[in-house]
Structure formats: C-alpha cells, structure tokens
Amino acid sequence: MSEIKKLYSEYLSRINKTFDYIELHLEKPMTLEELATVANFSKFHFSRIFQSIVGETPFQFILCVRLEKAAMLVRTNKNDGISEIAYKCGFSDVAIFSRNFKKYFNESATQYRERKYENSNLSQQHSKGRQCDEKATPYLCPDLKTIKWRTNMKLNKSVEIKDLPKMTVAYIRHIGPYKGNEQLFESIWTRLFTWAGPRGLIGGEDFQSLIIYHDDPNVTIEDKLRMSVCITVPADTKVDGEVGKMELEAAKYVVARFELTAQDFQEAWDWIYGQWFPTSGYQPDDKPCFEVYPEEPKDGKFIVDICVPVKPL
C-alpha cells in the first residue's frame, strides 16, 4: 500500500470511530471537542477534516442521523409518542425536533406516521393473496424452549426468537449506494479477509461473517447509506487503517433464515417487516439489524440469517 493510501486509511479509521461513538451516544448532547478527542484530531482541525471526508459537518451529520432514526421509529414503533421518540433520538426540545423533521422530510412527524401507516395498509390490501400464501404461525419448540414460526414464504427456511450474545466485530465500512452491487460486496469482503487472514482471525467455532446496516434505506438517501461488512474477532483484537472495531450488545432478535439469490434480498427484508412483524406480537427494537452468513454461497445462492432486534409490541 502506498504511503498516501496508508495516510487516508488512517484518517478514515478515525472518522469511523467517530461514527461509532455518535451512534452509541445519539441520545446525548455532544461537543466538537468530545468528538475530536474520539477521533484523536485537534479540535481546531477536526471539523474541517470530518467535512472533507464525509461531505458535511459533524453536527450536520449528527442531525441527519437523529432525524433518520426518528423517522424509522415513527414508522415502526406506533405505540411510542412523537415526543418520546424525539427525546430518545437526542432532541431536548420537541419544537426544535418538529421544525427540523418537517424541514428534512417536508411533512410533520405525525403526517409522516399517518402516511406510512396508510401506505402499509394499502399495500397489505393489495397483497391479501400473498399474505395467505406467506403467513407465519407461531409454535413452541419444546427441545430448545423457544418460539418458532411455521411459514409458507418460499424463500424462508425458519424463523425464531433468539437471545444473541455480545459480539466484537472488525469491519470495513461503506457509505453510499450498495443495493445489488455484487462487485462492491466482493471487493469489501476480499479486503477484510486479506487483512484478517494473516492475523489468524478467520475460522473457529464462534467465527461469523455479517453485514450491519446502520440506516433504513426507506428513509436515508442512497448516497448516505452506511453499512459495515464484518467478521467476529476476539475483544482484544488490534485494528488499523480502514478496518475498525465495534461491539454489538447482547439482545433479543428475530432470526429468519433464507436461501436467496442476489436479487431476492429485498423481498426477504420486506417480508420480515411487512408480513412477519405485524402478526408476531413484536416490534423492532432500537439496535442495529444485520445479516449473518453461516455458509459459503453455492451456485449463486446465499444462506443468510436476517437478524432484527425485537421487543414486545
């Protein structure tokens, strides 16, 4: 790697640490000095460096992430009030939240919720036949003492609720469009495994490869979508350059296994949110969702576990 690429990778690594810190502390006020310390840059130069790499100032980025997270919660957590969601996303004043939400989405949070709900109902009405074919029925699995679902969804192999343990992952992050871009994913996986292989980090009983999605593609514009291609690593693993490290906390997830081609992923995600969630008794929890790949792809097909954090409705 050339010296220029090494330097850029180091800058990118520090900005990634800032992203991770912001996501973990989104409900709290943050100062420029605080963020600069996380990135290990001088507070006098941090904002300019951040803007040159990300395309917006740190506080513009924080505001966008807060608003997009709020929009996701408004759309999916119908039992939470608008004020409650505003506070949860780091807005200390509901009036400020309302003004920024309307400016960003061109409608109030209440109008956004009503429109999304109406569109969801309309979509369900137009797909009644499909719902009958793809319904999910819960049952208790005595051996595992867990709830599973029987489903007729053709791509789905199983659905169950699991308590997933805390995981430490090494990642390479991508910002921008990614849907259907097989070359992009292959490039990132190759770079990550090239870094991990010589360090003895590939394989083992608990090894997993996964992709974390930090933004809701129904809310965030494509150019700002963030995803992290990851592998699980020991907690004391040292990272460098474009490879970052973060922890996923232990939580309860719906884990839905699918057999998919590259073109089927959106259908699988849509089924979980549009078909499974409305009849499950659960709602999405406020934590990252991700895909786990338990097997190598074969003949253009992927075995993938889509994992979405859940809490009772």
Image (cartoon, grey):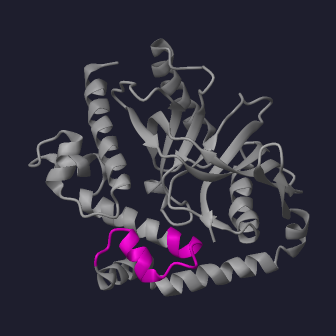
Q: Is residue 115 above or below residue 127?
A: below
Q: Quadrant of the C terminus?
A: bottom right
Residue 13 location (% of width, % of height): 32, 35
- Choose between 130 and 152: the one closer to the eye: 152
- Choose between 300 and 204: the one closer to the eye: 204
Q: What residue is drawn where x is 59% and y is 83%? A: 115
Q: Is residue 3 above or below residue 302?
A: above
Q: Is residue 111 above or below residue 284?
A: below
Q: Is residue 193 above or below residue 312?
A: above
- Decide if residue 132 is on the left or right side of residue 105: right
Residue numbers of the magenta segment: 72-92
Q: Quadrant of the N terminus?
A: top left
Specify the farthest residue to the left.
44
Residue 271 location (% of width, % of height): 74, 61
Q: What residue is drawn where x is 33% and y is 56%? A: 25
**Res. 106 visible in picture:** no
- Choose between 47 and 184: the one closer to the eye: 47
**Res. 87 visible in picture:** yes
Q: Is residue 77 magenta?
A: yes
Classify residue 132 by image quadrant: bottom right
- Decide if residue 113 is on the left or right side of residue 180: left
